[in-house]
Image (spheres, rainbow, N blue to C red):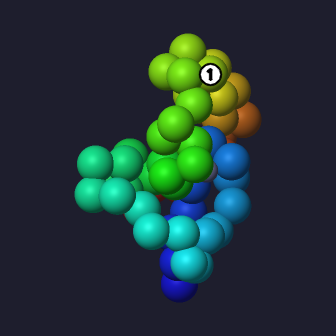
Amino acid sequence: MGHYCRICACNKPNEPFSGKWHKDHICKECSKKPKEERCAIDQENEIFGFIPLS
Ligand SMILES: [Zn+2]
């Protein structure tokens, strides 16, 4: 299955999501991005409805 990252919008089967970010559906790589950048992407995703519910 892997994990879906809502920021880069892809499944990362081998990506070790940390517990902190896993619940937010953000991969390790994206968790390093500035908060502003993640928020901007989040807002875009909300507009287009790309955020999965689970
Ligand atoms: Zn990501």
Quarter of the image that includes the C terminus: bottom left
- Image coordinates for residue 24, horizontal then vertical, percent: 38, 46
Q: Viewed as shown, does residue 28 lie left or right of 21?
A: right
At a point 53% along the width and 69% down the height, the residue shown is 15
Q: Viewed as shown, does residue 40 lie left or right of 35?
A: right
Identify residue type, mark 1: Glu
Q: Can residue 40 be seen from the camera position used here? A: yes
Q: Secondary structure at mark 1?
A: helix
Which residue in the structure is indicated by mark 1?
37
At a point 68% along the width and 52% down the height, the residue shown is 9
Q: Viewed as shown, does residue 17 lie left or right of 40?
A: left
- Viewer-side residue, 35 vs 41: 35
Q: Residue furthest left?
A: 19
For the residue carrying disc 1, how many other residues have a C-alpha within 10 Å: few (<14), some (14-19), or many (20+)? few
- Image coordinates for residue 28, horizontal then vertical, percent: 49, 52
- Image coordinates for residue 29, horizontal then vertical, percent: 57, 48
Decide: is 32 above or below 23.
above
Image quadrant in which you'd find residue 7:
top right
Q: Viewed as shown, does residue 16 lie left or right of 52?
A: left
Image quadrant in which you'd find residue 45:
top right
Decide: is 39 above or below 42.
above
Q: Residue furthest bottom?
A: 1
- Viewer-side residue, 37 vs 50: 37
